[in-house]
Image (cartoon, rainbow, N blue to C red):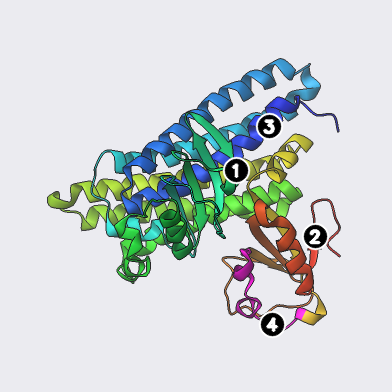
Amino acid sequence: MKRLVEKPVFNLLSDVTHYSSVAVDLALYTLASNDVEAAREVLMIERTIDDYLSEIIAGISLAVRGPSQAGLAIGAVTLAEALDKISDAAADLAGLTLRGLGIHKFVAAASVCCDEIVALVRVRRKPETIRSAVDVLLARKGSEYILAPELDKAVDSDVLVVRGPLEEVEELARTLGDSIYPQLSKGTSALVSAIAGDELSSAILQLKSLARLMLDLAFHSLLYSDKSTAREVLRLEDEADELYIRGLSAAFAAGNPSASDEMVSIAVFMKSMESLADAATLIAGLVTNDMVSELLIETVEEAEEAYVKLLVTEDLAGRSIGELRLEDKGILPVAIRTGSTLILPVPRAYRLNAGDVIIVKYYQGSAVDVLKSLEERGFRVILPGSPEK
């Protein structure tokens, strides 16, 4: 297939995909940590994305040579629009921290409700050797960003965006002379346990989880040209809209004048999550409308988060997802297709059937170890373009 644009625009699309993912995760961290410097970093990343998007649109406009390439151009522009929605949502979340608004405890809890966190770590001292299992997603050296840098090359005054278990991130921060904000040092469990059972908290948590799940499914559907999964994303949009309205209704019903700032934080948070869902819908629409191109597939392949399908063999039949302990290798199950049914989110108690297909994601930095681990566990890894059976 003839590529629509030259390599520089492809590189820009890949970089924006990476930046937008980092921006959202870092913005969520600012809500739980009240880290103003991290919030400013999100806005700097968002401005970088806007600059790149302008270059992408200009490059595509110059590359189009007649009506035969219009479909490819629309596909690339639509992906860019979706990434712009993601980065704008991140900037809105960071703006809550920068404005000094009170962040509702439900919002703070939903922001860190996972096994790993993304955080900002400042290099204040550089030891001779650094041993850490934490992933470095982004480094800023002065005004220049470097994607997926090597930790050993960090120097004093660098600003790092890192991802990993809370304890590992704390340890790296101490090694580099920095510290994680007190709200997170106390652990995330106290935050999460404070929000059980309430109608408002339920809507917030469900919308956050659904929006991130929709993005994962949308990127996967693009990578594999998977129309069935793309249609599931479009179906989930109605559910996301319903959660958004339900959450706002509960927020206004529970509000009082003394807590107006916190009510604003809920409204902005839920609107940002709804924007992520809208971005996922745009991406899925490319698949259902047959607008997937080599350019878009390669863009997703180069992104920081990787997606693969796993075919369940007879040897794994009957085992539960929890027993496999995929998370120990940083492998996160997104959905399971059993027959014509797509199961999401993935229950840990679900027992596998031979022939089930599991959609998982992991981070590119650990790709070799991840794929080897999956094969050793008995899965057949299905890469893009490979037959499922």
Position above or below: 178 against 5: below
Residue type at mark 2 is Ile
If you read the primary sequence from the N terminus, does the residue marked by circle 3 or circle 1 appear first?
Answer: 3
Residue type at mark 3 is Asn
Q: Is residue 319 located in the magenta-colored stretch of the structure? A: yes
Residue type at mark 1 is Pro
Q: For this rendering, which residue is in front, 190 or 251? A: 190
Which residue is denoted by mark 4 in the rendering? 319
Q: CA distance from mark 1 to mark 2?
A: 29 Å
If you read the primary sequence from the N terminus, does the residue marked by circle 1 or circle 2 appear first?
Answer: 1
**Range covered by the magenta-colored residues:** 316-333
Percent x, y of residue 339: 75, 69
Q: Quadrant of residue 325?
A: bottom right
Q: Is residue 305 located in the magenta-colored stretch of the structure? A: no
Disc ID at residue 149: 1
Q: Residue at horizontal 36%, vertical 56%? A: 246
Q: CA distance from mark 4 to mark 1?
A: 38 Å
Which residue is denoted by mark 2 in the rendering? 382
If you read the primary sequence from the N terminus, does the residue marked by circle 4 or circle 1 appear first?
Answer: 1
Residue type at mark 4 is Arg
Mark 3 against mark 2, which lies toward the viewer? Answer: 3
If you read the primary sequence from the N terminus, does the residue marked by circle 4 or circle 3 appear first?
Answer: 3
Q: CA distance from mark 4 to mark 3?
A: 41 Å
Disc ID at residue 11: 3
Percent x, y of residue 165: 49, 63
Crowd rating for badge 3 (residues with CA inside 10 Å; few <14, some 14–19, many 20+): some
If you read the primary sequence from the N terminus, does the residue marked by circle 3 or circle 2 appear first?
Answer: 3
Position above or below: 220 against 109: above
Q: Is residue 205 left or right of residue 199?
A: right
Mark 4 against mark 1, which lies toward the viewer? Answer: 1
